[in-house]
Amino acid sequence: MGNETATMEVNQEAIDKIKHILLKENPILFLGAGFSYGTKNAAGRSIPIGDGLKELILSELLKYDIDSEEYQELNKYPLSKVCQYVEDEYSREFLNDFICEVFRNTTPHDYHFNICKFNWSKIYTTNIDDMMETVYRQSGKDILVQNLSRASTLKKNCTQYFKLHGCIQNPSGGFTFSTAEYIDSMLSHQDFRFSSFNIDIQKEHFIFLGTSFDEVNLDYYLELYKNAGFSSRGQLFFISPNPSLILQSKVRKLKGNIIRWTTKEFLHFINNNISQQVDKSKNTERMLFHRGFVTFDYFKKEYNDNNLIESKLYSGDEPIMDDIISEWDFKHPIVDQIVSDISNRRASCFTIYGKTLIGKSCSLLRIGQELYRDGYCVILFNGRDFDTNVLKEFVAQNKTKNKFVVLIDNASYFYNVISNFKHLVSGKTIFFITTSRTYLHTRKRYALLNGSFKEYFFDSEITRPYAQIIVNKLREKGYLGELAKLADEESKLDYFVNKNDLMSGMLELTYGKGFIRRFTKELNAELSKNDMRLKSLLLDLAIIDKAELASFPVELIAMLYKTNTNDLINKVSNYIKQTKNKNYRLRSSYFTSKILDDSGKEILARNVKDILIAISPQVIEKSKNYWTEMFETLLKEKFLSKILKIDKGNIRKLLVELQNYYSDTSYYWLQLGLAEQKLSDYEKALNHFRQAEAISPTSYHVQHAIGRNFMRHANSKRNIVESSNLFKEGEKIILSLINEKELFQAKSHSVHCYLYEKIYFMKKFQVDPTNEELKELKRYLDQLTEKDEEGVMVKDITNYFYNYLNGIGKLSMIKVKLSDLNKYNFIFQEYDKDVLLDYDLD
């Protein structure tokens, strides 16, 4: 213990840092070969590391005498080269069988069990033995071993153990010892384990235990850490009793920390200094924070009243909680309305929608702050994976609050999760308040109709009362600028009332008139340069903005552009801004149009493909995380054709090129089928839909696509006999979905599809329907109007139906009550076929 005390005195600053992070945050543990040093395998022999394994391979596997020329020559090479030699001369299986025998059934030391005294969310390792599995099993704790190139989702809410270099429990996956395998793991876009490490190393705190980082591929990932930038990355800690000069040099360059402990000393520290001090009641809150849920208690604690907050809100930056607490925001009238509706329990989900950059995010945070002051427990979701289990657990264990509010910005992708969430947990009430852009909200809102929800349109128009609020706040903060020169108050109000939206008014006030022209000129100058990396990154950001995704993940920049990414980000700093979760997006939609117009469609398709390849290992079907949202949005045939304007042939080519990365995902085959359908190749489309069905046999989306494909195929024919057979096949599938599905979201899309295709069929082939048949169609339509008479999709299909009745002289058969006339005042307006079809399910 004397040596341990002396060591701790030398490393006290680093020890204080690691203690704070272990107690307050959720670091990730990385285990190297030194962690298993000294343990024994099933035969009672010590587990070899480094040269020890190399010597065993030479003497016991290859049977070379220590004095032989072969032994002497091969022993000069590193382990990776020797493994490569064995594979080349014999086979990979020959080497793998021997390695499994050496590393199987490893017996841990007593101190190894202390690792379970801390609730690690993730552990990465280059070790291939099974010691950690034994430790967790004998400690009665769950562990999810990630030893495949694709993610395992067998267990939830337990420690994930990533085995980067292989696992003796899965020898068919191979082991990373050879030089070729090191390089393969660096270049692979399809390995979930390395992709996850790639992402985590750029954002999370890491503790490295028992590794010298000699492995070339792990050196590569440390380069990613270096490129991530100080504002994004966490802290690194290296636990090593005798760090090499090379390791010390690397750590200094990374501004990391070295603690001169052995594995045993570190695990004793966990047992004696961490596990005893961890507030078990705070474990769930810490896990909640790590999953991206941040309580307003945290914001209040982090806010320093003594600091003079100089907000960047008026320069176009994203709002942060310091802006709200310091009251730099303009309080929109919608805030009081929603706070009142929540107090009166008008619904359980409250949704604000409108166009981008008009103040929705500010209002969301302001509503949260008002409710927090009123005694609600307010939680802001900033994460990528909406973990409902950890949220429910936090609510259930909270002994001081009964009313909870969850805030979600850009929430349309999570509408299904919100709708299915049990709003009453152990006698407690949970409200959701969300924002979304208009297009995405309109398409996804039907998921919310299964529950209790209220929606609010956030108009970009600035009313006179709101203009007064804005002017008063600018005066209070000393930011009137040019407005101070205006003689009267009415002129100041006119300035904002006459603007298209708040953002354009504030940017002009901040940067002066003609700022768009100046910024565009600067951007043109950058785009005219032959800097392909800069152009490509700007295009990536423009694609994300056009897709109405929340932001471009900071880790993705390093994944796509590999080196010198800090310099790259600095070059585009005038055109981008960092979001509250430290990702990036373009500063203004003005830039988006210019960048997209400057790019050819082939280049556009290439960048979409590169993004989708880079994120592919993180895409887990049916998982509601941001990677999957990016995948589903960017892969969508409708987005590629209607928004990016890529032609049908290039869309199909793009999707085919992605097959190796997404062939086990039903959504991929669904979109490929839709692309074939757009090319009028209905047989190929059906084949791809069947492949999607094989992966997800109970998927409503897939069954809907199959039924719709039959009907669209029918409507493409000229012969009514051939068409009728196809139509009946599709009609049977769609009607079964309408009659079986209870969820309004499913029923609404299927009814919409059925009515459109049925009417199109009758019009094309001049089929004269009976009154009973028309009344049956009306009954299906009524199922929509009764539930959501104000819905845009419902209005469009209703208009389409009534126009059809009017065209065939059957409008009089539908009896409309005088009191219901207001519901149908939109009927006979002009409708666009493309707009109508745009609401169909994709």
Image: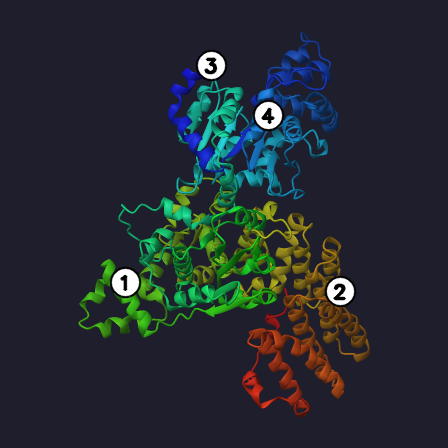
- Under mark 2, the amino acid is Glu
Counting from the top left corner in percent of width and height, residue 733 is at: 76, 68
- Under mark 3, the amino acid is Met
Counting from the top left corner in percent of width and height, residue 791 is at: 56, 74
Q: Alpha-carbon distance for marks 4 and 3?
A: 20 Å
**Which residue is at the front of the view, 4 or 186?**
4
Tell me, for residue 473, which label it has, or none: 1
- Under mark 4, the amino acid is Phe
Badge 1 density bin: few <14, some 14–19, many ≥20, Cα 10 Å:
some
The numbered mark, 1 or 2, whose residue comes first in the sequence reads 1
**Which residue is at the front of the view, 711 or 384?**
384
- Under mark 1, the amino acid is Lys
Classify 814 as above or below 57: below
**Which residue is at the front of the view, 305 or 634?**
305
- Please identify, in this view, whether the residue under mark 3 or under mark 2 is nearer the observer: 3
Q: Alpha-carbon distance for marks 3 and 2?
A: 75 Å
Q: Secondary structure at mark 1?
A: helix
Q: Alpha-carbon distance for marks 2 and 4?
A: 59 Å
For the residues bearing labels 2 and 4, Cβ distance under 8 angstroms? no
Image point (72%, 28%), residue name: 92
Counting from the top left corner in percent of width and height, residue 440 is at: 53, 64
Q: Alpha-carbon distance for marks 3 and 1?
A: 62 Å
- Please identify, in this view, whether the residue under mark 2 or under mark 4 is nearer the observer: 4
**Which residue, given by chain and number where applicable, does mark 3 sit on?**
1
**Which residue, given by chain and number where applicable, does mark 4 sit on?**
113
Image quarter of residue 424? bottom right
**Which residue, given by chain and number where applicable, does mark 2 sit on?**
683
Classify 474 as above or below 63: below
